[in-house]
Image (spheres, helix red, strand yellow):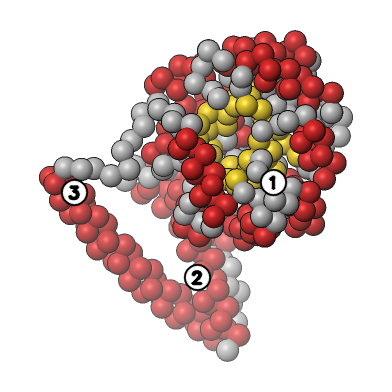
Amino acid sequence: MENNKNLRNWLNKMELAHPIVIAGPCSAETEEQVLKIAHQLKETDATVLRAGIWKPRTRPGNFEGVGALGLKWLQKAKQETGLMTATEVANANHVDLALKHDVDILWVGARTTVSPFIVQEIADALKGTDKIVLIKNPVNPDLALWLGAVERFYESDVKNLGVIHRGFSTYEKTRYRNNPEWQIPIDLQNKFPDLPLILDPSHIAGRRDIIFDLCQTALDLNYDGLMVETHFDPDNAWSDAEQQITPKTLDQITVDLKIRKQEGDEVEFKNKLNTLRTKIDVLDHQLIESLGKRMKIADDIGMLKNKNNVAILQTKRWNEILGKMILEGEENKLSEEFILRIFKAIHQESINHQKKVMNN
């Protein structure tokens, strides 16, 4: 636990009036591009310049980064602006090159976090380092993989460790490129409460128009910082053009963001909050009781189906329930996305109950 406290102390020593802001292009494209963005970011609240040097792409044929040459551009930008620098590393060779070019912050990408073999290779290469290392969540919503990556770096005595929340892939169509799944980083922080947590709204959003809302949500959840992809000409960026914003837009976002107090200090506020929380506790208890009663009925349905040799899944009935619940959800100001998640989970649990009854 000493590791993440070291990074927390480092964040406190920066004496920022706001969460830390890491910004810069998705990809380092040219020396001129990197330097121009760095100088523009110098006029904002950003304290760290980020840029992808090696770009792991989902499919070949897309721009995959300029390689080690870009590290010299980051080094020059650091000398000219005083900004710290950050880049992604995906193997021990990347680590070696980044350290030789005095990169301040190294992050492990989502595609890398899914492989314990590669994570261990990087952790071994960084053993005992005082460099800041940030670990992005894995591509898929798997808390155990994320925790495992964190633990591997702890075991390698990495002194300054944090995590980046960049959202999770899903087959379902949502308003996000990668679904936030806010509960997963919350669960991770429950396991490692001193671990600094940074939001990557660019990869969650996939488009620039909802970046502000994501940043505000992160601050409302007490995140420690933001990593935002910025480019002086986003529409013509060589990679992920739609999710990048200009340094000027970033500056406006940081001005408009509201930083909440972690706790209210007025007696009246605390009393009202406790009252509202008590109401939520009562409703949560009723929800669990209602779900328990629903599953008992599912057990009875399972016994009836078993007796009459009827299949568990009744697609027509399921679609009728889903359509009805979506409409009722709208009437109660609940999003379709939320209703789908809740009732798919309920349906799966109901199937599990019926299977258990029929197998016995």
Q: Residue furthest bottom?
A: 360
The spot of residue 318 in percent (x, y) is: 51, 60
Tell me the kind of residue under disc 2. Answer: Ser
User: Of callouts 1 and 3, which one flags the residue occurring earlier in the amino acid sequence?
Assistant: 1
Front of the two marks 1 and 3: 1
Q: Is residue 204 left or right of residue 157?
A: left
Circle 1: element type? loop
Circle 3: element type? helix
Tell me the kind of residue under disc 3. Answer: Lys
Write the residue at 54% across / 66% down.
348
Q: Residue under circle 1?
A: 129
Q: Residues within 10 Å of mark 3 (few under 14, many from 20)?
A: few
Residue 170 seen in render: no
Could you give the CA–CA distance between mark 2 and mark 3, rounded to whole angstroms?
40 Å
Could you give the CA–CA distance between mark 1 and mark 2, rounded to whole angstroms?
50 Å
Could you give the CA–CA distance between mark 1 and mark 3, rounded to whole angstroms?
43 Å
Front of the two marks 1 and 2: 1
The spot of residue 330 in percent (x, y) is: 37, 43
Q: Is residue 17 placed above or below 179 in the rendered structure?
A: above
The spot of residue 243 in percent (x, y) is: 62, 25
Q: Residue under circle 2?
A: 350
Front-most of residues 161 and 190: 161
Q: Residues within 10 Å of mark 2 (few under 14, many from 20)?
A: many
User: Of callouts 1 and 2, which one flags the residue occurring earlier in the amino acid sequence?
Assistant: 1
Q: Is residue 132 placed above or below 256 in the rendered structure?
A: below
